[in-house]
Each structure stands twice: as structure tokens, then as C-alpha cells.
Amino acid sequence: MDSKSYNRILNLIKDKENPAALNAAGVLLIFYEYFEEAYAILNFNFDANGDEFAKKYLKEFWLIKEYIKDFNRALELANKKDYRYAQKILEFYYNKGLMTISGFKLFMICLFKRRRFKEFRRVNEEIKSLGFDIDFDKYIQHLNFKIKSLLFTSSIIPSVLVGAYIVKSNSKTEVVYRDLPQEKQIVYKYVEDDSSKRLKDVLGSQLESSLYKNGLKMYKNKRYDEAYNYFKLAYEFTSNSYIKQHTLFLLAKVSKNLKRDDAVVYYKEYVREFKYGCYYDEALYDLFFLLYEKGQVEAKEYANMIDRRSIFFNNKIKRIIGGGI
């Protein structure tokens, strides 16, 4: 893991009373294959904060054991040049949305070695669009050449002992982020690089979707403080996925309910970026009243942008803008 990613995770776990941040740190640690640390943080989050999502992640941690076992099977098959079956194993987790950094790289190797160049390009572009550069682009220019370096690196990757990673933390009072002892580390030679330059986009819509769904659940239960934490994290990790406009609008909505000053900022960003978005008129309506209550002249400008056919261009709006501010 590069230092930027390491520090980002450290920042997430500094606020020990923020369940959403701790869960996000746990998910990222899983992606980077620090499974013991991920389990410890999620376990702490459940013990200290009683977080139900952390509890759910812990209950489903057996999936990680299965993933590690299947990854090692795929790796062994790839070493024997059985790329077809190795790809089939990894494709299951790719479609399920459960992939670590090593899984992505081995999956790409299998596609390339099987000359599945169209799929290779598609996956490569998907990964790049999320801000995760595995540096396969240079190979696309030489698709007819054998890549000896990849074969070499694949052949020296050691297998993983599953039992070493599913260990409960004995820490009850604090979260401790530490490097695993060398004998317990997952050392994938082709993973030891600094190719991931933008951690917030590494998991893209996978992480964003998880945070958004958790925030939506809190929002529906009117637990606005918790909803804000989840939507704020989803916003920070946002990609150009379809979830982006929903995340931004609900972050603005929750901020308004909490009477936070940043509500105006988020509403303005939504109006600017999603002119034809599904919440456009409602965002203008909310933004108008936030500014109107503060006596700001620009409020009328936003009110006049509301579609006249919209339910949000109601009599109250008409009376106010008709009489001026």
C-alpha cells in the first residue's frame, strides 16, 4: 500500500466515534488485503459503537475466507497456464463486486493471456474510469507479444494461509493500525507498487453504493447525523456513477435538516452539475428558501430557474418572488 493510501485510512479511523468512517476504513483495508486489520477495526466499531453495519460485515467475513481460497486456486491454475478456469473463478467475484487489488490484476492477466482483448480493454477502461491505474495500457499496444514479466511475477506469488487473517482483535479500548508481522502478510509481488494514485476512486461505485445505501437507510429512519456521515463519505469517494446525483442531493437535504451551513454549498453544486437531474426543481426550491431566510438577493435568481410546470413553482414561491426580497 502506498503512503497516500495508508494516510487516508489513518485519517478515517481517527474519529473512533464515527461508525461510517470506521466501516469505510475496514472496506478499504479489505481491498488492500489487510484482512486482520480490517476485521479488528470492524470488530472495534461494533463493540464500541454498536454499529449494525459493522456487525453485518463481521458476520459476512466468511466470504473473505472463501475469496482468499478461490484466489489461491485461480493463482495456481494460472501458474499452470490454465487461464480459462482461473478467469472463471475470478469472474464470479468480479461480477459479485468482491475483488481485492490482487484479484483485479490476476483477472486482467488471465484475460490478456487468453487473448480476450475486447474484455481486457473493457475491464481496463472500467478500472481507469475509477481512477485505479494498474498500468496495463502499455501492453494494449503490443497485444501479439508475450509478456514474460507477468508470467514471472505470477510464478513467484506465494499462496495465502487463510487462517492467519480471521483473528478477532483483543483490543477493547482503541483502534490500532499496524503493519502485519512479515510472516502473516499477503505478499503478492505484482501488487507491490504505487499504481493507485487516487484512493478515493479505487473502489468507485462499489464503495460509493455501499455508503449511499447505508446513508439512505439512516435518512429514512430520520437519523440525520448518521445519514450525514455516510453521505459525506460517499460524496468524498464519488465517481461519475449514476449514484453521484442522488448522493449529492441527499447530502444537501440532510445538511439542511441539520441546519448546517454547508447545505447551500451542496445545493449549489447539485444545481450547477445536474441541470436536468431528477431533483433539479426541488433543489432549486430548497436552495431558494435557504438563501431567502438569510436575506440574500441571489435567492430570487434560483427561484426563477424553477420550471413553471413543476409542483415546486407553487403559490408561495410566486408570492415571494412577485413581491421581491
Image: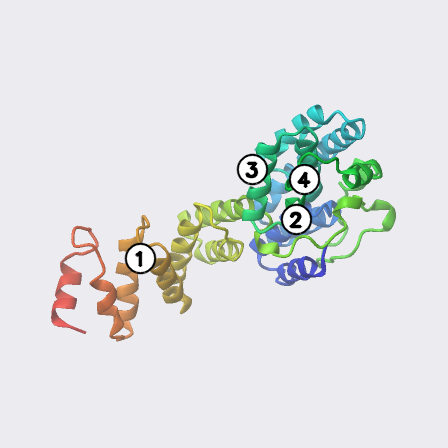
Q: Can see residue 186?
A: no
Which badge, 4 or 1, comes first in the chain's sequence? 4
Q: Which residue is mark 2?
A: 42
Q: Which residue is mark 3?
A: 122
Which badge, 4 or 2, comes first in the chain's sequence? 2
Q: Which residue is mark 1?
A: 283
Distance in Å between CA atoms under marks 4 and 1:
49 Å
Distance in Å between CA atoms under marks 4 and 2:
44 Å
In the foreground, 321 or 125: 125
Residue 134 in the image: state x and y as whole percent. 66, 47
Which badge, 2 or 3, comes first in the chain's sequence? 2
Q: Is residue 325 left or right of residue 155?
A: left
From the image, state whether disc 4 or disc 2 is nearer to you. Answer: 4
Distance in Å between CA atoms under marks 2 and 1:
36 Å
Which amino acid lies under the numbered mark 3 shown in the image of this protein?
A: Arg
In the foreground, 125 or 37: 125
State the mark number for residue 142.
4
User: Callout 1: few (<14), some (14-19), or many (20+) C-alpha neighbours within 10 Å?
Assistant: many
Which amino acid lies under the numbered mark 1 shown in the image of this protein?
A: Ala
Tell me which residue sits at (74%, 58%) in the image: 176
User: Callout 3: few (<14), some (14-19), or many (20+) C-alpha neighbours within 10 Å?
Assistant: few
Distance in Å between CA atoms under marks 2 and 3:
34 Å
Tell me which residue sits at (14%, 62%) in the image: 318
